[in-house]
Image (cartoon, rainbow, N blue to C red):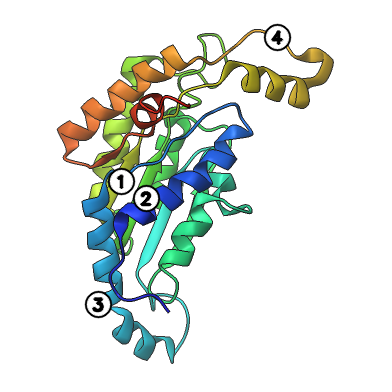
């Protein structure tokens, strides 16, 4: 088994390599680097510290015995437990120390995600160990698209979401929407819509960058660490 502590640089790279395969199916490119490592390290240490107490509590049942890690986001999160997915990598890293729960909602933007908060994260809910928040890829769709959310509304929605998550979780990490690879996105359109595919990019890297900047700004206001997938990927010459 793994030692109680782990190299968080390796963890974040494993997470993002898994995220690449999920995002690529939607024409979104994800790069890897060690960002938000402090929050991850703290979560790993806290999970390890509680492992012996968890073992004792599990003797009387499964629910509530271990700390919980919630992956909250859109389809990149929903599909993260597929083969090679980043969510599976997180669950593997925290095996026997925390329960990792997938709360990804394909196609969701922050407007719709905001309505989930009262039921998913009520004020009296248990204190989670870590929540990841990854929205923006759908919000950044072109105006006129069903999932599009104007930039300022997106920022306000995200601000509201992060404030709620900080109340119910010891650690929160927010992730920026990734850049868009045009040819792959158009191929995804053809695969999904067939003859109804428009052949016009409804998502672009330039638009995603504006929403990524909003994530960075709101995260700074809320004091939440950022895993800046967008900048990390674009900084890679081979992206």
Asked if the residue under mark 3 is in contact with the one under mark 2, i.e. CB atoms within 8 Å, the reply is: no
**In this image, 191 relative to 125: left or right?**
right
Label 3: element kind: helix
For the point 42% across and 19% down, the residue is 208
* Separation of marks 2 and 1 at Cα, in angstroms: 5 Å
Asked if the residue under mark 1 is in contact with the one under mark 2, i.e. CB atoms within 8 Å, the reply is: yes
Label 4: element kind: loop
Q: Residues within 10 Å of mark 1 (few under 14, many from 20)?
A: many
Q: Earlier in the sequence, mark 2 or mark 1?
A: 2
Asked if the residue under mark 3 is in contact with the one under mark 1, i.e. CB atoms within 8 Å, the reply is: no
Q: Quadrant of residue 4?
A: bottom left
Q: Earlier in the sequence, mark 4 or mark 2?
A: 2
Q: Is residue 169 visible?
A: no
Q: Which numbered disc, 2 or 3, marks the residue closer to the eye?
A: 2
Residue 64: image location, x then y, percent: 39, 75
The quadrant in which the N terminus is found is bottom left
For the point 38% across and 74% down, the residue is 97
Label 2: element kind: helix
Residue closest to the far right: 195
Asked if the residue under mark 1 is in contact with the one under mark 4, i.e. CB atoms within 8 Å, the reply is: no
Residue pointed to by mark 3: 49
Residue pointed to by mark 1: 34
């Amino acid at each position: 088994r793994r030692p109680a502590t782990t190299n968080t640089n390796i963890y974040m790279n494993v997470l993002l390599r898994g995220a690449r395969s999920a995002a690529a199916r939607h024409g979104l490119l994800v790069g890897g680097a060690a960002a938000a490592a402090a929050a991850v390290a703290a979560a790993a240490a806290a999970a390890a510290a509680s492992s012996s107490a968890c073992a004792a509590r599990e003797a009387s049942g499964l629910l509530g015995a271990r700390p919980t890690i919630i992956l909250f986001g859109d389809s990149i999160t929903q599909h993260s437990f597929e083969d090679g997915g980043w969510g599976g990598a997180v669950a593997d890293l925290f095996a026997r120390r925390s329960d990792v729960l997938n709360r990804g909602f394909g196609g969701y933007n922050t407007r719709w995600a905001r309505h989930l908060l009262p039921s998913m994260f009520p004020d009296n809910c248990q204190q989670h160990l870590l929540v990841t928040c990854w929205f923006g890829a759908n919000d950044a769709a072109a105006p006129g698209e069903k999932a599009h959310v104007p930039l300022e509304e997106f920022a306000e929605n995200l601000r509201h979401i992060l404030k709620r998550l900080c109340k119910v979780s010891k650690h929160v990490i927010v992730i920026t929407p990734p850049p868009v690879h045009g040819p792959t996105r158009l191929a995804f359109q053809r695969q999904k819509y067939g003859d109804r595919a428009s052949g016009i990019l409804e998502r672009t890297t330039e638009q995603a960058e504006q929403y990524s900047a909003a994530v960075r700004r709101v995260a700074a206001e809320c004091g939440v660490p950022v895993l800046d997938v967008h900048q990390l990927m674009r900084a890679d010459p081979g992206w």
